[in-house]
Image (tube, rainbow, N blue to C red):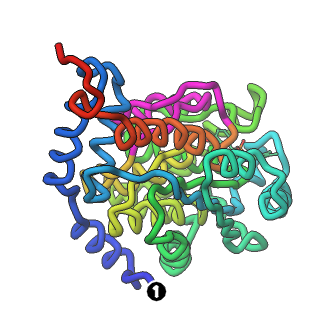
Amino acid sequence: MTAPFPTLDSFRAVLAAQPAPDATAGAAAAARNGQLTKPPGSLGRLEDLAIWLAGWQSRERPQASAPQVVIFAGNHGIAARGVSAFPPEVTVQMVANFRHGGAAINQLCRAYGASMTVHALDLDRPTADFTASPAMTEAEVIAALTTGWNAVDPKAHLLVTGEMGIGNTTSAAAIAAALLGGAPEDWVGRGTGVDDHGLARKAEAVRTGLATHAAALSDPLQVLRCLGGREIAAMAGAIARARSERIAVVLDGFICCAAALVLERAQPGALDHCLAGHISAEAGHGRLLDALGKQPLLNLGLRLGEGSGAALALGVVQGAVACHSGMATFAEAGVSGA
Ligand SMILES: O=C(O)c1ccc[n+]([C@@H]2O[C@H](COP(=O)([O-])O)[C@@H](O)[C@H]2O)c1
Ligand SMILES: Cc1cc2nc[nH]c2cc1C
């Protein structure tokens, strides 16, 4: 299927016409939850998770055995400004590692029974350095959104969007600063491990980028085009497609959430089908999650990206679904109620 948005304005229209969860299925799942052999509420957030997922999947008993992980890779012009601890060639090298099964995300996909696809977006053609000109043309950002849109398997029970892109924490920080305000220093972090000088170069790059594109920043989709990257746009496209298929999404770290933020700002409520898988160690992620109104499932100090924190959270969702669908009711088990 080709994506139904040849322009950013048509993508905006797609976002404005997305489906809602099925309240009847949610109510049926909540009723079942109330009958299960446990004190009411004793499974905490697992109960809410299963009920929420039932609404999106339109079934009383939700499923989580067939999750999909999509990994998008992109290269960034901003990387030439000394904003990463690693050189840009690592992006293409890690794509090869993903394809050979050697990365962390490959192991986590195996652990949780997730399928995984890897999408390298024009790696030999980095985006423009956003301090000087827009990172992407409209055609380029549409192409990346379309790659993301088309990467989603409509049969998946859940979606994780992951990324790989040297320099992309600077791009994500610029997006967050543009859409949420605050100082560049509030949004830049150590990324792959930059020192204090690298951190200062990141803040300076964000400051210059915001000044260069000031006239365009009132439109979230222009923020994505001017300050984003191809893998960031592809994640936004995949998250939007998942919503159109009513597939719930588990968000990953700082870069994934910056992509998601673009959708939320373009269309409030666009992330109702998303949950925060984890809080990453990247400095601005907690503030970003607060702005999205999402409470992370896990806090493990991860700062890897590539969908790893969200993939780990798949295990929690699978636990929630296993309890909801497999437990006996008080009546079935002959257990006395309160
Ligand atoms: O997911 C996160 O929160 C996260 C935090 C720090 C770094 N990363 C990963 O590291 C890369 C970006 O870091 P950097 O220093 O090159 O901007 C990119 O490939 C991300 O997947 C990811
Ligand atoms: C080695 C390496 C692996 C990664 N995976 C996601 N981002 C990454 C960044 C680096 C540098």
Q: Viewer-proximal residue, 83 or 294?
A: 294
Can I make out residue 207 in this image? no
Give, as a single range, the part of the protein colored magenta: 275-303
**What is the x, y in percent for residue 50?**
34, 41
Find residue 336 and report its horizontal and vertical position in percent.
21, 17
Q: What kind of secondary structure does the magenta stretch mostly adopt?
A: loop
Q: Nearer the viewer, residue 266 or 334?
A: 334
Horizontal placement of 205 versus 18: left or right?
Answer: right
Query: Is 93 on the left or on the right of 56, as rendered?
Result: right
Q: For disc 1, does the CB lie below 8 Å from ligand 1?
A: no
Residue in the picture at 19% in, 57% down:
22
Residue extending farthest front: 334
Q: Is residue 75 above or below residue 54?
A: below
- Which image quarter holds the C terminus? top left
Look at mark 1 in the image and give the residue it sits on.
2
In the depicted structure, whether residue 221 falls above or below residue 306: below
Q: Does the magenta stretch include residue 274?
A: no
Is 122 or 55 nearer to us in this picture? 55
Q: Residue sitting at 44 percent across and 30 percent down?
A: 287
In x, y percent, where is residue 109?
66, 51
Question: Mark 1 is on which residue type?
Answer: Thr
Quick check: 13 above or below 53? below
Q: Is residue 197 left or right of residue 40?
A: right
Task: Give the total of numbered labels.
Answer: 1
320 relative position to 22: left or right: right
Q: Residue at x 34, y 23 (%)?
A: 44
Asked if residue 223 shows in the view, the reply is yes
In the displayed structure, 204 sits above or below 228; it is: above
**Which residue appears at 45% of the width and 69% of the height?**
155
Residue 329 placement (x, y as % from top left): 26, 33
